[in-house]
């Protein structure tokens, strides 16, 4: 299937136009057109995560690496630990948090936690 097909399918399931999706993601409609029509065009990590979050699916599902739309059990455990107030240091040690193979900084972890909390408030 691939990213372009998954994106188009999710957008249609949600019943929104390319223009509406572009507005929701604060990008140009032409980007959505390119993503849906060019199987080789995949957005960068941050945009990819924003799209996955918008549709409430995992990035792995969006990239067609998994047929499961839900978060993995490891992702759920991390979210629960954040909710229960584990410190940055505890999270970093327990999960060996990395970004692109590099240890995650405290600033990056804080940004991720803030993002996750805002998602939960929207739901």
Image (spheres, rainbow, N blue to C red):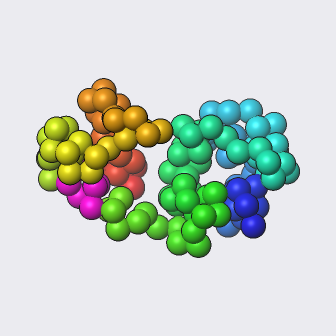
Query: In what quadrant of the picture does the C terminus appear?
Result: bottom left
On screen, residue 56 versus residue 33, left or right, reads left
Confirm whether the magenta stretch covers residue 6: no
Residue lying farthest bottom? Answer: 67
Where 109 sits versus 17, above or below?
above
Q: Position of residue 89 (x, y in %)?
A: 16, 38
On screen, residue 122 versus residue 83, left or right, reads right
Q: Is residue 14 visible?
A: no
On screen, residue 40 versus residue 99, left or right, reads right
Query: In what quadrant of the picture does the N terminus appear?
Result: bottom right
Confirm whether the magenta stretch covers residue 81: yes
Residue lying farthest right? Answer: 37
On screen, residue 33 versus residue 2, left or right, reads right
Q: Report which quarter residue 107 is drawn in.
A: top left
Where 63 sits versus 40, above or below?
below
Prevailing secondary structure class for the magenta stretch in the rendered image: helix
Residue pictured at 39% horizontal, 48% vertical:
119
Q: Position of residue 87 (x, y in %)?
A: 14, 41
Q: Position of residue 62 (x, y in %)?
A: 61, 58
Q: Position of residue 8 (x, y in %)?
A: 75, 58
Where 78 sits versus 96, above or below?
below
Where 27 sits versus 96, above or below?
above
Residue pictured at 63% horizontal, 33% vertical:
26
Residue placed most toward the observer, 35 or 92:
92
Magenta segment: 77-82
Q: Is residue 110 visible?
A: yes
Residue pictured at 77% horizontal, 44% vertical:
41
Count how many numbered circles sit on residues in the image: 0
Residue lying farthest front? Answer: 101
Residue pictured at 23% horizontal, 58% vertical:
80
Q: Report which quarter residue 34 is drawn in.
A: top right
């Amino acid at each position: 299937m691939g990213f372009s097909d998954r994106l188009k399918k999710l957008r249609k399931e949600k019943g929104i136009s390319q223009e509406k999706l572009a507005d929701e993601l604060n990008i140009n409609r032409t980007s959505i057109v390119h993503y849906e029509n060019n199987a080789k065009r995949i957005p960068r990590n941050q945009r990819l995560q924003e799209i996955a979050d918008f549709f409430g699916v995992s990035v792995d599902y969006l990239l067609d690496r998994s047929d499961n739309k839900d978060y993995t059990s490891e992702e759920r455990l991390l979210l629960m630990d954040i909710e229960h107030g584990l410190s940055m240091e505890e999270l970093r040690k327990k999960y060996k948090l990395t970004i692109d193979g590099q240890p995650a900084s405290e600033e990056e972890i804080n940004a991720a936690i803030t993002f996750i909390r805002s998602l939960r408030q929207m739901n």
